[in-house]
Image (cartoon, helix red, strand yellow):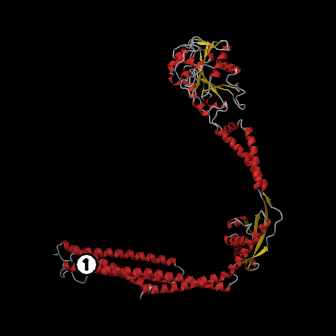
Amino acid sequence: MALAALSQPAGDDPIMQAQPSTEIPEQNPLVSGARAMRGRWKRTIAGAGGLGLIGACLGLLAGDQLYEAQAILRVFPQETNILYSTGEASVLKTFDSFVKAETSYVASHPVMSRAHATITSSDRETAEGMRVSDLSGSIEVRRSDSLIVLKTKSREPDFAKAKLDAVVSSYLNLQTEAEVSRSAVRLSELNARELELVDRLDDLRATQLEVGGEYGMNALAKAHVEKIAQIDALAARKSEVAATLIALEANNGGASADTSDEEIMRATLLDRAMADLNFERAKLMSQLAGLRAGYQGQNNSRFELKVKAKLDEIEVIETALADRREQIKVLGQTGALTDASAEGPDTSLADIRALFTKVEGQLDVARKEAWDLNRRRIELDQVEQDIDQAQRLLEETRRALEVIRLESGRALPGYAVLMSPASLPTSPVSDSRKMLAAGGLVGGVGLAVLIALGLGLTDRSLRFAETLTPVEHRLPVLQVSDVDCSDDCAADLLRNELQLRPLRQPRLVGKAPIIAVTCVTDRSTTELARALAASCARARMKALFVEADIGVSSTSVQANRWRSVLSHEGGQPRAMRGSTGAWELRKGIDSDIDDSSVSAPMVRTALDSLVEDFDVIVVSAGSLTNRLACQFVLSASDVGVLAMHPSDPKDAVLSQIDRLDTLPRNGSVAVMRNALSKDPWLSVRT
């Protein structure tokens, strides 16, 4: 309702609904950064100047003048015109790889370590504290065709030359020493390898005789194939005898073993045995065909041995097949596996069991012998492969020995000589002082800006009224002024703004509008409320000023009058001094009411007793954060006025938006006093 209630018609005007809250737009980070830097540019520029000057001075002192020395090594090939004399580019590539390797060797740790020892012994004071890694990092080694270029920089020209001289001499000395020892080392290593391979061949041949014994590789393979065929025959015989034994046991031992059913069973077993042998023969024929296809057009003794072994296996299987066919023929003629006729004497159950035990024992012995033959064949094959490998290695070693003996002194593709020794530099090649000074200046300026931006982003104070832009639809900012709270002109402008505010609810007939002035910090709102009441009085309205900020420590006369009104113990209004038409509560009886003993009915009853006698009532409610009774005063008022200062905590203001918007009947407005000069709303909301 606010002061606009004075000009609103009474009666049944419809209730004006509050505007719906809109979604708060996301803030642009650049805008937030610019807002954080607002008002800080002068101090930022001053700080940037100071820090930039300090950084520039430090960079100037930290910079150095560096002198550069250079030495050149040239790598010559062992033969001149190597590309044209051989006609092969591979020789040139070999020499190129050698140059690359020598370039890497110049920068290696052994060379640098010896150079460091040389420098330390010759110039101990200058090289004090220098490590091998420092020397290696200070020297640049690069390759240019067949040249190895060494460069180094130092603050002292003499030390730059000394470093290159030490590195070049260390490299050449190490090359000479390596050339002397290379041939002897390689020959000794190859001789030791030759003796080792000869001993290994002797051991392998002894192992070959031990494993093979009286059998060779072919004999072992043939014997293994024959043993497999014997195992198959014994297994078939065992199956036949087992079938006969089962039939006799089924007839309680009284029937003949050569009955018609037994003959059919034996024929079936023989037929199955022939099927297995045919399958094994087909598999061996397939392996033989694959072996011949893999070695087609080649003459190899190992291939011929494998082919002969396969043929022997096939021959054994064909013999077994012929034997099975003959047995089936005899069975068809006589009904037995032997030459005995069906009318012969019956075979007893004990004989059949003895025969079964005998065949089973023979089968076990045959399997053990086959396993031993297979093991010996595998071991012998591996030994022969090891012998072949050792013989090849021995031949390669003997050829390498011959090559080393013939090429003694010419083992490497080339040799290196010093083409250009290090010279004493006379002028610096780089001056880092200017660059470091510029970097220090830029760093100082950037540091100052970052510090100012960090302070702005971490500052939790309100600073500018535009901070409330996201919530202005709930708490409008009516006035932004750089004067204090007691300024009369600012109070008149605020009074007019309040009169022009639209109402959420209709005015109550005969009731004076109540304006509650509050804040969010522990600061007095008396001056702003008193100035607003005096402004209303100057506008010929009967205004009452009430100081309702009754903290525990408050002992002012105005507060005691309000306590008297709350406790119904007197406290009548009286004219305000220095203002015509403005009233304040008369001094009443002191009471023990404090902020924690006030209730909402007490506040409403006290204000209702005053609204019929005045045109407007301005109440100083105190801090909304620190005063418990402030919420009751706001809930009993028509409009709330939030008095803000730039130093108020932003979070405290934003946390009270809901209370300021919902407790007064017509919402609340905000007022900024003592605003900063850079506040963008200072020129438009005054």
Instruction: Tell me: 629 left or right of 486.
Output: left
Image quadrant holding the C terminus, namely top right
> Residue 653: x percent and y percent?
60, 30
Does residue 310 appear anywhere in the picture? no
| Residue at screen point 31% across, 79% down | 363
> Which residue in the structure is indicated by mark 1?
356
> Residue 480: x percent and y percent?
68, 26
Does residue 65 appear anywhere in the picture? yes
* Of 327 and 386, the residue lying toward us: 386
Instruction: Tell me: 73 left or right of 183.
Output: right
Image quadrant holding the N terminus, namely top right
> Residue 249: x percent and y percent?
19, 73
Question: Height in image: 534 above or below 353?
Answer: above
Crowd tier of the residue under label 1, counting other residues whose Cα lies within 10 Å: few below 14, some 14–19, many 20 or above: many
> Residue 57: x percent and y percent?
77, 51
Amino acid beneath label 1: Phe
Q: Give SS at disc 1.
A: helix
In which quadrant of the rendered view does residue 227 lie? Answer: bottom left
| Residue at screen point 31% across, 75% down | 271
In which quadrant of the rendered view does residue 145 lie? Answer: bottom right
| Residue at screen point 24% across, 80% down | 355
* Of 547 and 38, the residue lying toward us: 547
In which quadrant of the rendered view does residue 522 lie? Answer: top right
How many numbered discs sit on the rendered protein?
Answer: 1
Q: Residue furthest right?
A: 426
Instruction: Tell me: 263 left or right of 157.
Output: left
